[in-house]
Image (cartoon, grey):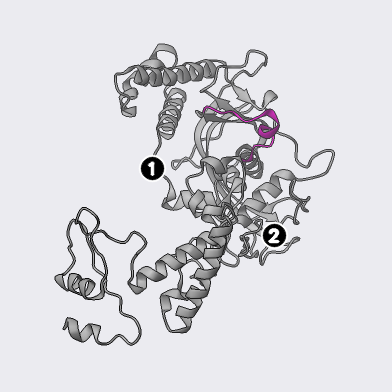
Amino acid sequence: MFLSAISRAGRRLIVTAALDGDCAPSSFLLEVAEATGQTLFNDDGELEPRPDVADLTLPGLVGELRAAAVAGRLERADAGARARGRKAERLLAALARDGVSAADPANWAGLGQPTSTTPLVGAGQEVRISPSDVDAISQCPLKWFLQRNGGGTGTSDAQRIGMLVHGLAERAEREGLRGEVLRQALEDALPELGYPDTWLGNLARQRVRDMIDRLDAYLGSAPAPTLVEQTVDVHLDLPVPEDGDEEGIAAGGGEPVARADGGRAAGAGFPADGGEPTGGGPVAAGERIPVRIRGRIDRLEFLDGTPPDSSADGVLPAGQGQRVRVIDFKTGRTAPTQKSSARNAQLATYRMALAALGYRVDGSALAFLAEEPRKTTATPYLVPSGVVLDPSPDPDTGQEWDLELLARAALDISGPTLPARSGDACELCAFRTSCPVNPEGRKTVA
């Protein structure tokens, strides 16, 4: 059998064997080497593998050529890598012409046609969006989508703290927990976080205790009466904004109106050449996009009038012109700047939803419980300063920035493609290697 195999060579014969912990060369290899005057042993009399011989199977060869071709196209590739890449591309083309399907880029996952070009939201359907998602979508729709569809890393310690503090904030309002009673409720719940009895564990527990102390201080000074954990569910038709420049979106036209038929799905994508993300799609400026806003408000404080009776499912009923203040608790370590918080996407979306329900929003703020309060302001726990968002339309420019922010977010997640946007958060993003904004994620092929 071996003699029959080697007799088939017409010009050149290559005989190989593996040498590792599980395999040893056949004696036939030694006989061939001796007959041809080849040396297989080193000075110590041990078999010595050739370091420059890689996988000589066809799939292994194609894999090496593809790796070299991709490496030669990277931005950080040097002249040698680019030269090897061009040579690998020529060899791959030759193999593809000879019928090696794995060498044809048309068969590489990631370089072929998308599996579907169907919009994520069909024609005439509403785009469902949560106020808490608008800011994340505005920063990077691709990251938002991956996180919402199983791409996250599971529940983090920060998220567990957030859920515990929000749960206690709800109980404190509903059950009237204050002072030592509220602190004891925290002590009963602290084991849920699983902190060890160590110095670091004690620091982490104290940090949560400090948050509850600040929560207690805020609740003692907050207006009453208050509804907590109220779900807003509103249908709007938003004007599709015109394309904006790099600083923002140009002013659109019109106020949101009650839910009506019409609207089409929109798409935005990342160009195949790796350029900057672009918007656009089947929806044109001047049309309208139907949006359903649904989310839960941490605290809705009534500055005058009587709160309506909460429904059994927690959905906030329509108002009768009552003045309200929206408060959203935050347990993260980093507070936004005054400028950015004055146009906070989540609070602005709540303001639009409440206005559509018949309430007068006379204040919106984020209550940061993880920071020491600012003693130089009348609202030490709250941002923006003064508990007031920027007006919309802007009195100077006429820009309806809140409508445009929500409409742009709705368009971004309508599909069929999702924009990837670069920014400060890219450095710590868990999806860098799958993101076309970054060189290591721009082309994912298999």
Q: Residue at x 57, y 16 (%)?
A: 221
Q: Amino acid at mark 2?
A: Arg
Q: Given the image, on which type of amino acid does mark 1 rest? A: Gly
Structural distance between the alpha carbons of marks 2 and 1: 37 Å
Disc 2 to disc 1: CB gap under 8 Å? no
Residue at 75% of width from left, 36% of height from top? 391
Near-viewer residue (120 or 33): 33
Q: Is residue 121 above or below residue 204?
A: below
Residue 268 x %, y %: 63, 60
Residue 323 located left or right of residue 90: right
Q: Residues within 10 Å of mark 2 (few under 14, many from 20)?
A: many
Q: Is residue 99 left or right of residue 195?
A: right
Q: Quadrant of the C terminus?
A: bottom left
Residue 399, numbered circle: none
Q: Which mark is residue 288?
A: 2
Looking at the rendered image, the disc whose residue lies closer to the viewer, 2 or 1, is: 1
Tell me if mark 1 has few (under 14), some (14-19) or many (20+) residues whose alpha carbon lies within 10 angstroms of its own: few
Classify 116 as above or below 339: below
- The magenta span reads 333-345
Q: Is residue 338 magenta?
A: yes
Q: Position of residue 25 (x, y in %)?
A: 18, 66
Q: Which residue corresponds to mark 1?
A: 154
- Residue displayed at 52% across by 74% down: 90
Main SS, magenta residues? loop
Q: Residue at x 56, y 53 (%)?
A: 439
Helix, strand or loop under label 1: loop
User: In terms of image quadrants, where is residue 22?
Assistant: bottom left
In percent of width and height, residue 438 lies at: 56, 51
Percent position (x, y) of residue 109? 45, 68
Q: Is residue 119 visible?
A: yes
